[in-house]
Amino acid sequence: MADFIKDILTPREFDNIGVRWQIVKRLAKGEHQTAIAENLHLGVATITRGSREMRKKQGGFRRALKVIHN
């Protein structure tokens, strides 16, 4: 699976996976979008996209959080 992910994503996208996961975890804890953006040196729009995905009850972010935190 790792090879598939590396092949389908650009090197920059692959490198950003860790940052995206930090966004998801912080949003799940209830951290404010502006604080996340400032702390991670990202635009608020990047955080907003993550927030929008987190609102999906059966979305991939929520499912991943359940699997990892259980």
Image: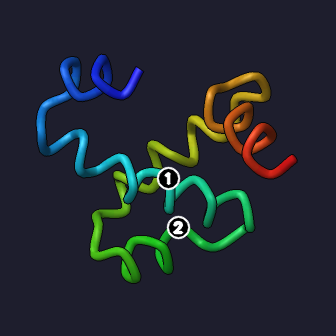
Q: Is residue 59 left or right of residue 21?
A: right
| Residue appearing at x 48%, y 73% in the figure | 36
For the residue pair 65 and 46, the one nearer the viewer reads as 65
Residue on which the image places disc 1? 21
What kind of residue is marked 2? Gln
Which label's residue is closer to the chain start, 1 or 2? 1
Mark 1, residues whose alpha carbon is within 10 Å: few (<14), some, or many (≥20)?
some
Residue 7: x %, y % from top left: 19, 20
Give the secondary structure at mark 2.
helix
Residue on which the image places disc 2? 33
1 or 2: mark nearer the eye = 1
| Residue appearing at x 76%, y 22% in the figure | 58
Residue 44: x %, y % from top left: 37, 62
What kind of residue is marked 1? Trp
Res 34 label: none
| Residue appearing at x 28%, y 23% in the figure | 3
Residue 24: x %, y % from top left: 57, 53
